[in-house]
Amino acid sequence: MGDNQIPPPTPSSSSENRSSISRRPPFSSSTSSELNLPPNMSRSSLSLENPSFSSSNSSHIDRMVGVGYHPSPSRTIYSDRFIPSRSGSNFALFDLSPSSAASSSSGAGAEGGGGSGGGDGAGTYANLLKSVLFGPDSGVVSPLTPEKTSTLDGRSIQLSPPSRNIFRYKTETRQSMYSLSPFGFDDALPGVIPSPAKAPRKVPRSPYKVLDAPALQDDFYLNLVDWSPNNVLAVGLGNCVYLWNACSSKVTKLCDLGVDDSVCSVGWANRGTHLAVGTNNGKVQIWDASRCRRVRTMEGHRLRVGALAWSSSVLSSGSRDKSILQRDIRAQEDFVSKLSGHKSEVCGLKWSYDNRELASGGNDNRLFVWNQHSTQPVLKYCEHTAAVKAIAWSPHLHGLLASGGGTADRCIRFWNTTTNSHLSCMDTGSQVCNLVWSKNVNELVSTHGYSQNQIIVWRYPTMSKLATLTGHTYRVLYLAISPDGQTIVTGAGDETLRFWNVFPSPKSQNSDSEIGASSLGRTQIR
């Protein structure tokens, strides 16, 4: 059924499905057999018994009086004048006493000792009249039970529930308007079943590709996987960095640091042409990926560099020496400023999408926020009870920051850095290793370690689980998202990289992605 189609109404003989505008008032002086005729037309001229009329004239008269006419169930019923809906009226609005007639009638009955029933009948009639006009909730107690219908002048009248708007112009159709509203109505007609809620989007439970990644370290504080805007995956394996082209599946060895050093972090520049490599010796190397040539080596840290984050031409590096160095690759100096505040190793770094704020997480259980020019944190969050490696800025709402804690914490927390407030907390039940937000929908994915090693897709802000993905046998320590925002890659100490289709495309957010379904199989990244 299309979006603009209206389903047929549920058949019913009850008067609940009829508009009160099309119904003749119950106290009208005319009957159903009388017609409103023009002054120059007499009632006798319309008699069907007049032999001078032919069958065609008789049919014309039938059309005039509506004989055999059956209105369309979905046709809108209009009135020729404004008549307010009185079913939602309240006596208090008109300064009327709801019990005046009732009290007078009951008083007359009491004084009469039950002799004549005329007074009591008049009171019942008055109560029924007010119930019909103003609704059963107007303070008048109807003598009828809710299951029964009243009989007035030989006609059956069923009391309908009161409307919430006394001056609503009655142009409803005979069917419920529930299906036309995305939220529905509180006063939907009885017996009308609302359309079922849309089924949640299905996320494939299995990876569409698995790559062997020998020597992928099982170290919580490292960041060894990143996906470039040019669709190239960089992976640090031991003392080497390998590039895997997602379009051609071609593997290229970018660099080898030698036996005396190892790769601790990798990070693509915003343009996707250069890759930063953090080493165990505290150095940061810049590589031209297209030429597989090292451009620059920068120093400044005394211990390993486990976290990297780019902001245009500025590269931030976090180290085990507790410091964060801001490096402008256009300047000759190795770094332009040093950020101090953490009391332990810096293991998480992320710039906001507008490049105005830098979030950092450390093994001191702290989450800090820095601006472009500060050397001290402008915001400090201390609610986590374990190391904070997982950090993600929302691409949908400015200032919305998500962070995840380690084994002793297991929580994902949300912060508003604009108002400096803690928004919510979700206990995931496992060590939170990584977070990444979808660019296409308001969802995020988290990867976990002890003790379930799972991957969870969440819908924000309800934090309802869309999918829980399993397959890794070690902690899922590494996570990156594809340039189109549909695919994620996860890495673990089981020395595998697994590719999952978890998010919809920007154009079709309600269809399952089938990208990579034909690429099932297991290959090696080196």
Image (tube, grey):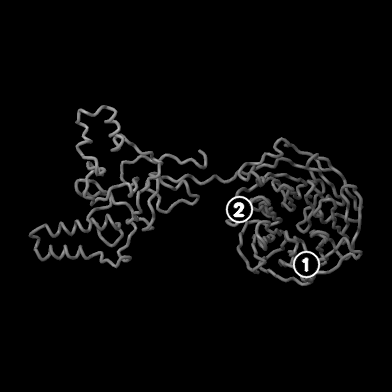
Tell me if residue 89 comes above or below residue 40 in the rendering: below
Count of numbered circles on the image: 2
Q: Are marks 1 and 2 in contact (CB under 8 Å)?
A: no
* Image quarter (top left, top right, bottom left or bottom right) of the C terminus: top right
In front: 371, or 1?
1
| Rendered location of residue 307, percent (x, y) | 79, 59
> Which badge, 1 or 2, is on the more N-terminal residue?
1
- For the point 66% across and 53% down, the residue is 444
Name the side, left or right, on which 352 lies relative to 112.
Answer: right
| Rendered location of residue 227, percent (x, y) | 77, 49
Q: Name, please, the residue furthest toward the front.
A: 40
> Callout 1, which amino acid?
Gln
- For the point 63% across and 53% down, the residue is 442
Helix, strand or loop under label 1: loop
For disc 2, the marked residue is 459
- CA distance for labels 1 and 2: 31 Å
Helix, strand or loop under label 2: strand
For disc 1, the marked residue is 372
User: Closer to us: mark 1 or mark 2?
Assistant: 1
- For the point 77% across and 59% down, the residue is 221
Name the side, left or right, on which 115 lies relative to 47.
Answer: left
In front: 511, or 17?
17
> Callout 2, which amino acid?
Arg
In front: 122, or 439?
122
Question: Is residue 348 at all visible to an observer of this figure?
Answer: no
